[in-house]
Image (cartoon, grey):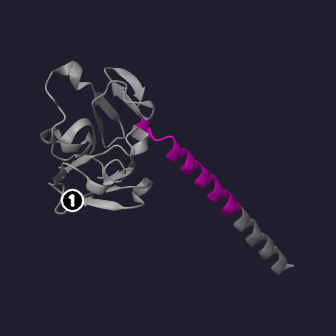
Amino acid sequence: MRLTSKLATGTLAVALATVAVGTLSGTAAQAQESSPGTKATLDGRAIDLSEGWQGADVCAVGTSGRTTCVDTDAMSARDARAASDCKKDWVCLWDKKNFKGRMLKFNDEYWHNLADWGFSNRAESARNHQNSWPNDHAYVATGRDGKGTQKKIPEGYKFGSLGNLNNRVSSIYG
């Protein structure tokens, strides 16, 4: 009887653990699907970047996950999307070669999926201006979450063209 009781207890524990893992996996999948990066603020109004940039030219994703965008054309005639506009502690992507076009920048070091910001398969140039510690590299990858072909962007480097990864980058680390 005692062995049967232990087997029943063990079976119940395995069943409960399986349910708990399934529930947590479902929650993680839901959290991944509803990324905080898709929502942004532009001129005081909320926009969803996964549905288009709606006039934004530069979007910054901060460490809190909050994304703030600006319409540089509305601010001034100056082209605010030059390589020098990727300030210290940021890694930046542009959707045109030679640091032209729309710019998306990050300052938190984990894999960001660019589709969340409507920027997947758009990047053509990049700059890593992070320098929190020596060898503070950024990476771009052709797949989500860093999967697929990767390219390292060493700290301080800028690439006016991503070469064979132009319009193929789906995620960035940095």
Q: Quadrant of residue 63?
A: top left
Q: Is residue 144 above or below residue 92?
A: below
Residue position marked by numbered label 1 in the rendering: 136
Residue 17 counted in the magenta span = yes
Residue 2 counted in the magenta span = no
Magenta span of residues: 16-38
Identify the residue at horizontal 69%, vertical 58% (top origin).
19
Q: Is residue 120 above or below residue 48?
A: below
Left or right, 54 with respect to 91, comes to right
Q: Main secondary structure of the magenta part?
A: helix
Q: Quadrant of residue 98?
A: top left
Q: Secondary structure at mark 1?
A: loop
Identify the residue at horizontal 41%, vertical 30% (top origin).
52
The percent position of residue 58, horizontal first and vertical second, equals 26, 33
Q: Residues within 10 Å of mark 1 (few under 14, many from 20)?
A: some
Identify the residue at horizontal 43%, vertical 36% (top origin).
38
Q: Which one is nearer the viewer's eye here, 98 or 41?
A: 98
Task: Inspect the image, locate mark 1, and give the three-letter code of the amino acid beneath it.
Answer: Asp
Left or right, 104 with respect to 86, comes to right
